[in-house]
Amino acid sequence: MADHGREGCIALLSDFGSQDIYTGVMKAVIAGIAPHVTLVDLTHEIPPGDVRRAAFRLWQALPHVPKGTIFLAVVDPGVGTARRPLAIQTDGFCCVGPDNGIFTYLLSGTQARAVEISNPAPIEKARIPGANRVGRLSVSNTFHGRDIFAPAAGLLASGHGIDRLGREASDIVSIPWPRLSEADDGSICGELLFPDRFGNVVTSIGALLRVPEGLRFEPWIPGSSSLTLPSAAARVRLADGIELPLVGAFADVPPGEPLAYIGSDNLLEIGVNRGNAAQVLGLSIGAEIRLFCP
């Protein structure tokens, strides 16, 4: 068995929700392999099968987790097919999950090594205590989170190297990045991404930093260039032509009024003071949005 004395952090993300036992079972499997590891639930409320949203939520979490964190991400509409189960190692963190693009944004700008989790021996050995109780050791075609990914994450947290989990993997699947570009008139064009539970909608425009010269744009998406806008004059235009002020806080506009602001990830967001922007403004995921100076 693995060295249970090593400590670490596993950050879990899935589309399992909270109604069923899937998340709890994965955590129980990890606890049986690496009882000293810290388990952090990033979210289990990703819409079913929404790999793109999962990729974005992982990117949001990265700056806030301890170095060496293992991201265990299971949003896996291709479970039971030929898609590969992966373990990925970088200088700062590891990833365990399906090869469906879920780690695209997380791995940007990193040097990473990946293996296909294809060596059953260490995983079967790690799972034996549970298998003895329930009389089952076969891998389910519908729950790789329990049977492959959770054991692999537990083994990594216990000090196993990724090389012990399988053969090297190349050509990792990636998903498209959100739209983000600079127009000829100096405006920044992006798209609406996802609403949060309050109805505030995050966009692809950012990172935005307030500096003495105005508003500094340092893109988080590869291929875009930095620039500075005069923040006092900056406004936001939605796809239907509605223009919003770029303000510092919700209270800068009256209750019920829409606004644009720089969110906690330094991305441009759309909100309504004491309201649900997605509903009030009829915002559609993927719609164009523009940050400009009149």
Image: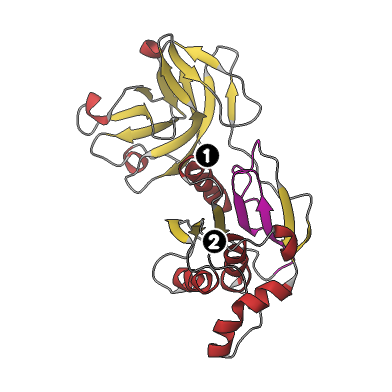
* Residue at the disc numbered 2: 6
Return the x and y of residue 196 as percentages of the image width and height: 38, 45
Return the x and y of residue 22 as percentages of the image width and height: 48, 72
Q: Does any portion of residue 43 appear in the rendered image?
A: no
Tag 1–tag 2 contact (CB < 8 Å): no
Above or below for 116 versus 180: below
Q: Nearer the viewer, mark 1 or mark 2?
A: 2
Q: For the point 75% across and 59% down, which residue is it?
A: 163
Q: For the point 47% across and 29% down, which residue is it?
A: 239
Q: For the point 73% across and 64% down, which residue is it?
A: 164
* Residue at the disc numbered 1: 286
Q: How is the image coloured?
A: secondary structure
Q: CA distance from mark 1 to mark 2?
A: 43 Å
Q: Does any portion of residue 42 appear in the rendered image?
A: yes
Return the x and y of residue 4 as percentages of the image width and height: 54, 68
- Of 108 and 126, the residue lying toward us: 126
Please state which amino acid type lies under the numbered disc 1.
Gly
Residue interval drawn in magenta: 81-109
Return the x and y of residue 3 as percentages of the image width and height: 59, 67
Q: Quadrant of the N terminus?
A: bottom right
Above or below for 175 versus 12: above
Residue 49 picture quarter: bottom right
Label 1: which secondary element: loop
Horizontally, residue 19 falls left or right of residue 137, namely left
Q: Quadrant of the C terminus?
A: top left
Q: Which mark is residue 25?
A: none
Residue sticking out furthest to the left: 255
Q: For the point 43% across and 64% down, which residue is it?
A: 17
Please state which amino acid type lies under the numbered disc 2.
Arg
